[in-house]
Image: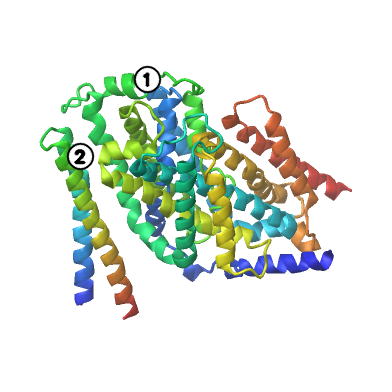
């Protein structure tokens, strides 16, 4: 049960980070943030994506193994 | 000689033993699985180069959009009406089906050709990644038209990357494959984000009022850069259609579709080709225009997305070269029976790295993709003829299997003959495969019918 919850949570956070990756260039294009902020936000959100997407995959594997 | 051949053939069969049996109904996969599988494919490092080359070749915006729309549609229909029906009816991989039709000898040659072509493709992916790493060390990317390695720095980067990719492919192919699944959606986002982010640099206003004007004058303005051939609508349409020729018309994707419940699952390839071979190509075109039309994928991604863009190019090369190296290794293993997988992958990786140091393979990627499809296309035509045409004409199917032929000489002659004819056809390279397919189909049917008459 906890495994499934953590997997869902990791999946949700991964998706959110991908949404941030897409939102950042749009905000830069609209002139709401600077180029530096866009690139930093994109980089940070990308790291979050990899952390949670990999965590989601790993938790799925351990749940299946368990 | 005969006993050597028997040994070689047996060793080759052992490699593919795991998929020798037709897929059983309990192993069939749902449409959603296929949609997910294809959505993760077709976003490779090469997309950074292909989309950019469309700009350099002076394709107009309207020609590009319509060409990609219809070319990709033709590709999806080729998967749906040519590849998937044969796969669903036979439930076999191309390897085993071709073996029944053309014999183990032709299948062996096919494997070697495939391995060599895979090595070049993986080499192009390493070259693309090298442009990203070279940026960090200030090493210049070879200029358009370069054939041989242009600097020691370039060779060093390619060798280091090739060694790293090969080592990972040896040590952790499965792990990297899982990582590639994670990276794939993010790499697609890098393309989209990069294109959106460079729009202000190209002069697009936030209300998008002048978007079309900018795209038609500053991106796809119909003017080819010096030394690049001018291409148009038909070139784009055919390119989008044939860039996966080996997979659909060439029937390699029988390996996937044999798990489909229905042949109509071929339509799910649209989930892969439209994002990868339309949106990603359009995005890389916009990005290359923003850096002054310089063929430098690393710089393009860095300017558009920053450090994450450089990582995107590197990862796109890495995650897509990995399975390509694996496939090349698998195909090469047929000539080195008894060699462990690591040794084969090392051999494939070494060959790939040497090829990657020659910039011609990534700077002539569009032509290479055309040649790759063209070389394997006749095999698809031969299988198509045997599967669909022979029963209608009363020609006996699978004679190679039934009569124990090592080589179906008709198949081999048609394959080589078609390539020879395609080589001299007075058509642009992109268009040659289509008449070639009909030539192969007709010639193979005629030869086998003549053999029956005799």
Q: Which chain does the residue under circle 1 lie in?
A: B
Secondary structure under tag 2 reads helix
Give coordinates of residue B419: x percent, y percent: 70, 38
**Residue lying at 32% horizontally and 33% vertically, measured from the top left:** B287
Quadrant, the N terminus of chain B: bottom right
**Residue lying at 67% horizontally and 24% vertically, measured from the top left:** B426
Q: Is residue B226 above or below residue B368?
A: above
Q: Which chain does the residue under circle 2 lie in?
A: A
For the residue pair B351 and B216, the one nearer the viewer reads as B351
| Residue under numbered circle 2 | A25
Give coordinates of residue B440: x percent, y percent: 70, 40
- The residue sitting at the bottom extreme is A66
Left or right: B67, with B248 as reference point? left
Give coordinates of residue B217: x percent, y percent: 32, 18
For the residue pair B94 and B220, the one nearer the viewer reads as B220
**Residue lying at 27% horizontally and 71% vertically, measured from the top left:** A59
Q: Is residue B273 visible?
A: no
| Residue under numbered circle 1 | B221
- The residue sitting at the left extreme is A32
Secondary structure under tag 1 reads loop
Q: Is residue B172 above or below residue B54?
A: below
**Residue lying at 34% horizontally and 37% vertically, measured from the top left:** B299
Count the marks.
2
Left or right: B129, with B83 as reference point? left
């Amino acid at each position: 049960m906890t495994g499934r919850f953590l997997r869902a949570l990791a999946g949700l956070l991964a998706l959110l980070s991908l949404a941030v990756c897409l939102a950042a260039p749009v905000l830069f294009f609209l002139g709401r943030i600077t180029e530096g902020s866009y690139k930093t936000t994109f980089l940070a959100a990308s790291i979050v994506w990899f952390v949670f997407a990999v965590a989601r995959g790993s938790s799925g594997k351990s749940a299946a193994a368990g | 000689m005969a006993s050597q051949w028997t040994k070689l053939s047996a060793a080759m069969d052992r490699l593919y033993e795991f998929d020798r049996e037709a897929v059983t109904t309990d192993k069939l996969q749902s449409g959603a699985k296929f949609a997910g599988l294809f959505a993760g494919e077709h976003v490779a490092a090469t997309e950074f180069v292909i989309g950019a080359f469309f700009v350099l070749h002076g394709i107009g915006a309207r020609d590009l959009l319509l060409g990609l729309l219809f070319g990709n549609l033709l590709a999806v229909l080729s998967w749906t009406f040519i590849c998937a029906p044969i796969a669903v009816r036979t439930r076999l991989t191309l390897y085993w089906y071709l073996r029944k039709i053309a014999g183990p000898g032709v299948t062996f040659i096919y494997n070697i050709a495939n391995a060599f072509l895979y090595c070049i493709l993986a080499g192009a992916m390493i070259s693309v990644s090298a442009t990203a790493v070279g940026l960090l060390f200030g090493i210049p990317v070879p200029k358009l038209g370069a054939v041989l390695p242009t600097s020691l720095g370039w060779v060093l980067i390619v060798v280091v990357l090739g060694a790293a990719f090969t080592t990972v492919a040896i040590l952790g192919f499965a792990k990297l494959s899982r990582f590639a699944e994670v990276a794939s959606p993010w790499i697609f986002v890098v393309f989209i984000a990069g294109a959106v982010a460079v729009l202000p640099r190209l002069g697009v206003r936030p209300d998008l009022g002048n978007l079309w004007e900018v795209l038609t004058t500053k991106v796809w303005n119909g003017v080819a850069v010096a030394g690049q051939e001018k291409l148009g609508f038909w070139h784009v349409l055919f390119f989008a259609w044939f860039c996966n020729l080996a997979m659909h018309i060439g029937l390699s994707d029988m390996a996937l579709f044999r798990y489909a419940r229905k042949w109509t699952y071929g339509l799910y390839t649209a989930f892969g080709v439209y994002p990868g071979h339309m949106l990603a190509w359009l995005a890389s075109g916009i990005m290359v225009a923003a850096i002054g039309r310089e063929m430098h994928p690393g710089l393009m991604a860095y300017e558009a997305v920053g450090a994450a863009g450089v990582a995107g190019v590197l990862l796109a090369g890495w995650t897509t070269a990995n399975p390509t190296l694996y496939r090349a290794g698998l195909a090469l293993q047929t000539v080195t029976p008894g060699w462990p997988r690591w040794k084969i992958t090392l051999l494939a990786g070494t060959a790939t790295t040497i090829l990657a140091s020659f910039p011609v393979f990534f700077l002539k990627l569009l032509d290479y993709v055309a040649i790759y499809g063209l070389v394997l296309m006749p095999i698809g035509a031969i299988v198509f003829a045997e599967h669909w045409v022979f029963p209608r004409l009363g020609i006996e199917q699978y004679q190679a299997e039934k009569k124990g032929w090592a080589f179906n000489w008709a198949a081999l002659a048609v394959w080589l003959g078609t390539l020879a004819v395609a080589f001299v056809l007075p058509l642009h390279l992109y268009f040659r495969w289509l008449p070639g397919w009909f030539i192969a189909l007709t010639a193979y049917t005629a030869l086998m019918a003549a053999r029956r008459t005799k």
